[in-house]
Amino acid sequence: MRLRSLVFLVSLTSLASTATAHATGGFGCTIDDDNLKLEIESAFGHGNGAPLLNFRGQFTLPPAIAPKGLERVTLDRANLPQNWLHQDELRLLIYVETVGDLPFASTEIVIMTKAGDDDIAYDGEYEMRLFTAAGEGEATQRRGKVSCSVG
């Protein structure tokens, strides 16, 4: 009887550790072109809408297009107003605006990717829009390629 209880406990512990291993995953994305240098990463839960955990990253804009105060930005969850990770799609909306006494400017980066054959590489495109108070409502737009991995 005692041996059966021990075997059951070991089996239950093994099942619990297997379930925990699949409860979370993560992703990372990189953009490195003439318009934008970006690196982001996050963990996510597999249940309850795949919530993001510990989203973080940074981006750097080239001096020719960077609004003052947004040349190099550290990102956290507050900069990610929308995200979508469902089946074979990963989509992110990153938003940052100037703070303090600087003239208003904002950067919006939309990342749209689809899973490849291996379900790990998610490649796609990004669209970036830069708004400045001096721009009279006109936005500077740039597009390019993005590479992500999801696991």
Image (spheres, helix red, strand yellow):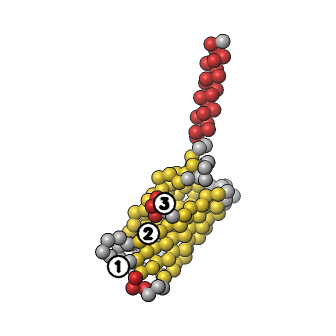
One can see residue 100 in this view: yes
Q: Of the residues shown, which amino acid type is indicated by label 1?
A: Pro
Classify residue 66 by image quadrant.
Answer: bottom left
> Does residue 39 appear in this view?
no
Residue drawn where x is 46% and y is 58% of the image: 77
Q: Name the residue that disc number 1 marks.
A: 103
Residue at 45% in and 61% down: 78
User: In this picture, is 2 found above or below 86?
Assistant: above
Say which element carries label 3.
Answer: strand
Mark 3: give few (<14), some (14-19) or many (20+) Cα within 10 Å: some
Q: Name which residue lies at 47% across and 75% down.
A: 35
As measured in the structure, the alpha-carbon distance from the residue carrying label 2 to the one carrying label 1 is 14 Å
Above or below — where is 36 with respect to 25? below
| Spatial separation of the CA atoms under disc 2 and disc 3 | 14 Å
Mark 1 Cα within 10 Å, few/some/many (few <14, many 20+)?
some
For residue 70, side relative to residue 42 (left or right):
left
Q: Please give the label number shown on residue 96.
A: 2
Determine which residue is flagged by label 3: 40
Task: Say what amino acid the circle numbered 2 marks.
Answer: Val
Q: Is residue 36 above or below residue 77?
A: below
**Quarter of the rendering containing residue 75:** bottom left
Give the structural element (helix, strand or loop) at label 2.
strand
Q: Nearer the viewer, residue 99 or 20?
A: 99
Q: What residue type is labelled 3?
A: Ile
The image shows residue 90, relative to residue 36, as above or below, that is above
Image mark count:
3
Where residue 123 appears, x then y in whole percent? 61, 64
Q: Is mark 1 on a helix, strand or loop?
A: loop
**Quarter of the N terminus within the rendering:** top right
